[in-house]
Amino acid sequence: MITCSAPAKVIISGEHAVVYGKPGLVTAVNLRLKFSVWERDKKITKKSIINIEAIVKKYLTLKKIKYQNKKFDFKIDSDIPIGSGLGSSAALVVCATAALLKFYSGREFSKEIVSSLAYQAEKFFHKNPSGVDVSASCFGGLVFYRKEFEFLKNISSLNFKIPKEMEDNLYLIDSGRALESTANMVFGVGKLYNRRPKFIEEILGRIEKTTKRITASIIKKDENFFVKNILENEIYLELLGVVSKNTKGLLNNLSPYGVGKVTGAGGKTIGSGFILFYCKENKGLKGFLKQKRLTYYKFKQDYQGLIYEN
């Protein structure tokens, strides 16, 4: 049996803007998905795995790498909530790509190769993904990302991390699963862009500045500057129309304890996925979340990214 695992991701700033060539600041967090594969004479029916298998075989054939064409079975174990903006599909394609590469060829491949192939596989889920989710899940740690063109993506694994004194105040709070898919949300922003190009371009420009300011606040360990820009980021996401009325209400109810923003594609109808929340009053926040029976996770960065476990 071959098992690979990869972490969830949290977009700290830049969601939707990354689709239009703006930068995104993303980190891997310590919720993991495991994908195990072993030889077995079984027909695979899960379309996403069939797609990954085809991409892996095509790559091995193109690179003239010998591989044994054998049938397999697989198992997925995941701590990452599905459809909530934490990159469950990215973690799956990263793990499955790495595991199937090793299953067929008998060797482990670099994270750069796995990331490139997994990005192709993620299109099964999101049609036009930015690639940032896969990058964070594969490489781990903080990632500064910008897609210049489809063929040119600048991915910088940053050599610093969110300071512990700031990390200790960060939470991931579930506003409810979005009814819309990531692809639908990206399409919706695209329609708005076509109708109001100047307005949306201005918002995307402001998100870019916010992304850079948040990055600077982490380097400088400036809590107040970080909090200010997290709040601004949420305002811009609301202007893009990716935050539901329910989620806005939740953020308002959470305001006595700190500030937060939607992380990920968002959602318009009911839930908007997870909120990245910076808390200044931990005890009060936990009491509120318990009272409202809201799912939450303590935010903790992951620095390992993809792991070949066996």
Image (cartoon, rainbow, N blue to C red):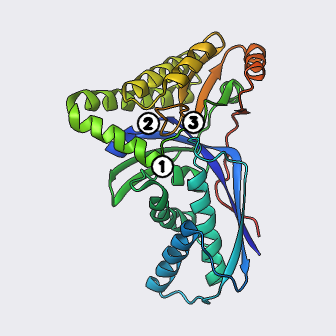
**Callout 3: few (<14), some (14-19), or many (20+) C-alpha neighbours within 10 Å?**
many
Residue picked out by circle 2: 14
Q: Nearer the viewer, mark 3 or mark 1?
A: 3
Q: Is residue 141 visible?
A: no
Secondary structure category for the residue under label 3: loop
Residue at figure coordinates x 69%, y 55% from the top left: 33
Q: Are marks 3 and 1 in contact (CB under 8 Å)?
A: no
Give the Cα separation between the discs numbered 3 and 2: 16 Å
Residue at figure coordinates x 57%, y 36% from the top left: 273
Secondary structure category for the residue under label 2: loop
Q: Residue 178, how many percent across, how many down?
A: 54, 38
Residue picked out by circle 1: 132
Q: Which disc is residue 4 wearing? A: none
Q: Are marks 3 and 2 in contact (CB under 8 Å)?
A: no
Residue picked out by circle 3: 273
Residue at figure coordinates x 37%, y 38% from the top left: 17
Closest to the observer, 285 or 224: 285
User: In screen coordinates, is 299 left or right of 150?
Assistant: right
N-term mark: 3 or 2: 2
Closest to the observer, 241 or 235: 241
Q: Which quadrant does the N terminus fall into?
A: bottom right
Q: Is residue 291 visible?
A: yes
